[in-house]
Image (spheres, rainbow, N blue to C red):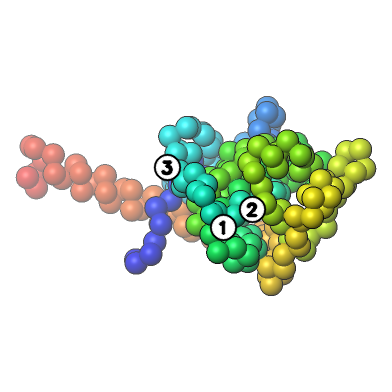
Amino acid sequence: MQGECKRTQGVSTTDLVGRMLLMTKAHHSNIDEDLDYRKHTDNFGKGPKGHSPWTGVSQFLQTSQKIIQFASGKEPQPGDTIIYVAGAFDLFHIGHVDFLEKVHQLAERPYIIAGLHFDQEVNRYKGKNYPIMNIHERTLSVLACRYVSEVVIGAPYAVTADLLDHFRVELVCHGMTEVVPDKDGSDPYMEPKRRGIFQLVNSGSNLTTDLIVQRIIKNRLEFEARNQKKEAKELAVLEAMKKLEEEKQPGSPQS
């Protein structure tokens, strides 16, 4: 199929769906894995004949090489407008892409830096079991976006003077979603507002991470059936490939 992208090893859609339905925090970074979580997510995509390596739950392992593969590697050049955006960017979706595209259109030569908040920070202002994707998974998702030039992994919630000066930020943008106050009750965008470089950007999209999660929960049974059927097909393909390999071996009846 034209335009198809290679699957990112270690990032399982079944695992993500399982996280939404189970409402646990075991997938967050720096939190010990819950055995019940692993058991339930394991069963979520499991068919009657075993596991497919693509549909089943897998442990995401972040490496520096993986980050390099996704990163643009571009440094800001003279004449570039350095724009900073921050957030969770959880379950990176078309709403995020629309927002970043609108931000990209604000300058002739934009250099967009995305600040990603740590899992515990996102959970503080989003609650429940958010973020669904941990900091490592969210980093790769945002780096893969063509409009993003750089990612700050574990950015501070408040956009500080130090951050703005360090990256020489000329514009700070936020979408139309609610801005939750910092732990001390202060506005996290107080400094860029004081400098007159803060701007709200309307993406034109009403899709949010919350809406995606609500849809998944509503369609739980349909997803479970889909995953089991999908895994059964993948196992059949694996079995056929294995049989073909065996037939090619020297000394086999067909060789």
Q: Pointer 2: what residue? A: 83
- Quarter of the figure with the C terminus: top left
Circles 1 and 2 in contact, beta carbons < 8 Å: yes
Residue at (81%, 45%) from the top-left corner? Answer: 191
- Earlier along the polypeptide chain: callout 3 or callout 1? 3
Q: Amino acid at mark 3?
A: Gln
* Nearer-the-camera pick, 1 or 141: 141
Q: Pointer 1: what residue? A: 110
- Quarter of the figure with the N terminus: bottom left
Residue 121: image location, x then y, percent: 77, 39
The Cα atoms of the two marked residues, 3 and 1, are separated by 22 Å
The Cα atoms of the two marked residues, 1 and 2, are separated by 7 Å
Secondary element at tag 2: strand
Examine the rendered structure and indicate whether residue 34 appears above or below residue 167.
Answer: above
Tell me the number on the disc at residue 195: none
Q: Is residue 6 left or right of residue 20?
A: left
Taking the view exactly as shown, the residue that stands out farthest to the right is 185
Residue at (9%, 47%) from the top-left corner? Answer: 254
Q: Quadrant for residue 103, please give it.
A: bottom right
Residue 230: image location, x then y, percent: 47, 57
Circles 3 and 1 in contact, beta carbons < 8 Å: no
Q: Pointer 3: what residue? A: 69
Residue 213: image location, x then y, percent: 70, 57
